[in-house]
Image (cartoon, helix red, strand yellow):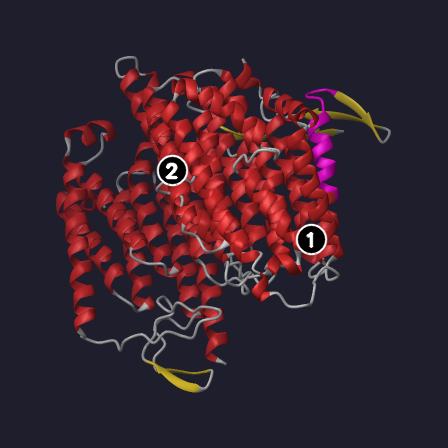
Amino acid sequence: MEFFSTPVFLNVALLLTIGCGAALLLLRDRRMQVGVIFTVFLVAVLIFINTLPSYLVLAKAIAAIIVTIMFFATAWQVHWIETPELTSTIESGTMSIQAVSLDELDVEATAPLQIEPERGLTPANISTFIFRGLIVVFLSIVALRLAGFDATQTILSLSPEIISISFVMIALGIAVIGLTEAPFRAGLGMVMLLTGFDLVYALLQPSLAVVAMLAIVNICVALGTGYLTLVRAERFLEVEEL
Amino acid sequence: MVVNIPFLLLAFLGLGAGVAWFAGRWQMLQLGVAFIVTAILLIFTAQVPLESNVIALGQNLTLQPALAFAGRALTFSDQVRPALVMLLLIALLFYIGAFSLRLAPTFVTASMLILMLVAATVMVKPFQFAALFLQVLAVSAVFLLSDITHFKTRGALRLLVFFTIGVPFVLLAGWQLEGAGNAQSGIDILDQAALLLSIGFLVLLSVFPFHSWVPTALEDANSYAAAFVIAVVNLAVLFVLISSLADFDWLRSSYIFQNVFGWGAIATVVVAGVFAVGQRSFGRLMGYAILADLGATYLTFTLTDFSGYQIGLVLLMVRIPAIVLWGIGIGALAPDGNDTFDALLGAAWRKPFAALAMFIGGLSLIGFPLTVSFPIRWQLYQELIVSNPWAAYALMLSSVGIILAYARGARMLLDRSAVDAQSDLADNPINNVMCIVGTIALLVFGVFPQLILPFFTALAQSFPQLVG
């Protein structure tokens, strides 16, 4: 168990966190997104193993599993991800929609469906990919720089590696939230942000009440964004049946 | 028999929500239940004595003011009593207005759950645990802001995002304050806590640039439900802020809090006025008008004397009748939720009372002369022009921007070219009566403020932590 507090593990965890943030920003497959958020939770719980009493770690692990299941169930309810080759009859004609993601479909009540460009390595997709990749790099550098300040270390009085992982999670969580209007992905971003905050806060305030409180907040976020995802998807399916 | 006051309050609200849920699609029954429960609790909250034996229904009852849970406590005291009275009064006004509208079946249930959470937020100690209730509150609000008929989720999602970002700041501030006992670093820690609390409250109180959920929610969601959410959620956060200001004298006089909050409030007022001018939807326009009014309320918290807080609390209360009247009006004008200027072309000729109610409600919110908010806005201008003239000018300019936008909306509503011969006046007589009564009430109270302001002022003064 000591391994989980060694610099080697913490550095691997930091790289894994950056990878998870990048994956949440770039991946469209909801199965993989749920897997990514589970990995984020796993990193946090493994860090807690040597820093918190075991009953608190257990409570956090249970909360993480519940939240992951909630996201999994939501994704399952809306058929995972991009719905390929949807065909919808609008007004006088039939239009084919190539691999439209429920996330990105901006269904207007009165406006016709907008046709999304075909997925694949189109120039637009490549530029989005590069843009989001650069954001991950930039925010990770900023978060690591902030975590390295003496003032930060003095105020928080925690291991620099844990602060770095926490700040990276918060920064990339905010990036995920900021770059989407889709409730599902935003929910994952919010949970990543909260997990980053939890990494620091649970070590500063190690009590069952605080753990329970943060678990409730996480579950609430999963519940709220799950509901919004279902509302959007319900409407989408209605439009599809037109 | 022992009666626990916080438990009784929460249980009644929860029970009301449950009954409303089972009442399903019978909206009148749901609203009847909500009205009765809220009215009974309002009287109970205003009158109930603390820690005493009372005889009711032949039983000797011992009233307990505190409910302990998980090492924390929900406490009913003279400090929280005015806040709860204000909350229930606001809810009652919304439920009365809702009788004339067609709302989602979940409105009453979700709104009563929200009231329950706000009541818990107000009563919980220590204050950082209120943050937990605020987060749950934001999630409950999501259910009011989005449903299958209002499937656009932007407003609800932004509300959830901003609360998720804001809550950690309040929690961190709580942690900082627990460490403030350390004599060597006490002052530094207080400054850090003030900064964290200021940022947290800026986010939670929809101060610019965290304001975007307000106009978006009013555009995307059912206008009346969105107005309820904005009014009540904002009230909950303000109560937490007021409670923090009361508990921490250093926060009230902190230059960090004064500066961050003061500039945030001015920015909100300016942005609201500027953005309002370009709006072409009454929902979004109302969103910016509400933001301008929120900015005005926040400015009162930067006034150094206690009269500022009282003005802020009265502003909070006079805002509600205006929002309710606007909601009744727009609910009748645009029952399908499409409240753009183009969609409502000439609508004032078909539904004149609803159009009038919407305008009077909207204008009252920005303190237009002869409306109920004007006297208290005037008092605020007098205070600001002495202590912070730029804030006073910003507030006036913002009001001008909103009036210009309403003038443009009025031109579209009164466009005769789009009028068909059919008048919709007979469609919804209850709505017409409410629009007429509400409009007259707002104007009468505006012309004769002495009829209502003493009540609001007395309620504001009953916040003991602010007057002494």
| Residue A240 spot, x, y in % from top left | 46, 78
In space, the residues marked 1 and 2 are separated at their CA atoms by 41 Å
Q: Quadrant of residue B37?
A: top right
Q: Mark 1, residues whose alpha carbon is within 10 Å: few (<14), some, or many (≥20)?
A: many
Can residue B265 be seen here? The reply is: yes
Residue of label 2 = B270
Q: In this picture, which residue range is highlighted in magenta?
A: B36-52
Dot placed on the residue nearer the N-terminal end, 1 or 2 = 1
Residue of label 1 = B20
Give the SS element for disc 1. Answer: helix
| Residue B411 spot, x, y in % from top left | 53, 54
Give the residue displayed 52% in from the left and 41% down from the top: B233
What's under tag 1, amino acid-wise?
Answer: Ala
Above or below, comparing residue B55 to residue B101 in the picture: above
Q: Mark 2, residues whose alpha carbon is within 10 Å: few (<14), some, or many (≥20)?
A: many
In front: B168, or B363? B363
Q: Quadrant of residue A202?
A: top left
Can residue B8 be seen here? The reply is: no
What secondary structure prevails in the magenta region?
helix
In front: B330, or A23? B330
Q: Would residue B95 be found to the left or right of residue A67 on screen?
A: right
